[in-house]
Image (spheres, helix red, strand yellow):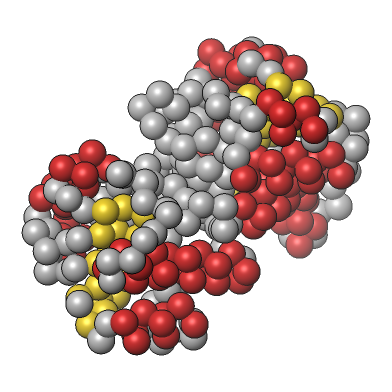
Amino acid sequence: MKILVTPTSLQEGKKSAALDALKEFSNDLIYNPAGRPLTEDELIPLLKDCDGYLAGLDYVTEKVLKACNNLKMISRYGAGVDRVDLAAAKENKIIVTNTPGVNAVAVAELAMGLTLSAARRISSLDRKTRNGEWTRSTGIELGGKTMGIMGLGAIGKNVARYAQGFGMKVMAYDPYINEAYAKDNNIVVASFDEVVKNADVISLHLPLTPETKHLISKEVMEKMKSSVILINTSRGGIIDEEAAYELLKNSKLGGLGLDAFENEPPTNSPLFELDNVVVTPHTGAHTKEATDNMADAAVKNLIDVLSGNDCPFIVNK
């Protein structure tokens, strides 16, 4: 079977037990030549003759899927499937799987890291100190503040636990929230507006859908505390970045931590000018432990489906 492998951390020449298992299953592997997520026009010539597809953060559109008549399944390397047209996959009888929960600790830890960095302006102070400046900067403490979590899934639950470890109160909004879990773990169940208006830090753990596109709009951000720290380690596009820039520049937001951007990689973003912004290159899931776990799970899903075995992680039944 011919299989395309596009995650940047799963490429030819890299040592990986998961890749070894995949090579045992197939001797016809195609790799990502770009070293970044692929566009639909880049994907089609690579994928059109493949039976299986181990997918990174590529844009798997209806155009791509219609051009790939041999394709039987897409195994997403990660939990998010927002860049895969699930309806078109189902229409073309292509099974899509994911690996939920395996990167939850990694992403949650980065969310807390971005929170700390924004609260104390660690990254900007690091740059200035290296450049010979000896800047005095007054940050804020997290203890006693309120962490507002939007999306109380596996990642959000870990963020809640870590925030409580810093002595923070935690409130969470999720349209499908498990109220019993929240009660047992001292998490206040809140509406979207309650989190927006009352949290000192807001951490986003939501999928990108038509409903969540620019969910954090200018109007929403204007309702937040002017000192709020906004963190996004989920998907770019949930925050209106242009509006966030204007509000940050005018001290209407306290800080911003981004691991995901509307356009990736971002180029010439005005956000980069600001000391109260800390950014990382969509690296939340990239710890050794998480990448190993994701690779193992994604390869197992692919082999199970293509071998006709049961797979509990099919997302487009």
- Name the residue: 25% across, 86% down: 27
Horizontally, residue 198 falls left or right of residue 222, namely right
Q: Is residue 55 in view?
A: no
Percent coordinates x, y for residue 171 in the rendering? 74, 26
Above or below for 124 versus 160 = below
Q: Nearer the viewer, residue 115 or 287?
A: 287
- Name the residue: 63% across, 35% down: 152
Q: Is residue 153 in view?
A: yes
Horizontally, residue 316 falls left or right of residue 117, namely left
Residue 164 quadrant: top right
Q: So how many labels did they put on this image?
A: 0
Percent coordinates x, y for residue 292 in the rendering? 55, 71
Above or below for 5 versus 154 = below
Horizontally, residue 66 falls left or right of residue 249, namely left
- Name the residue: 20% across, 77% down: 1
Q: Nearer the viewer, residue 142 or 274?
A: 142
Percent coordinates x, y for residue 62 in the rendering? 17, 44
Quarter of the image with the C terminus is: top left
Above or below for 247 versus 236 = above
Percent coordinates x, y for residue 26 in the rendering? 27, 82
- Name the residue: 25% across, 59% down: 73
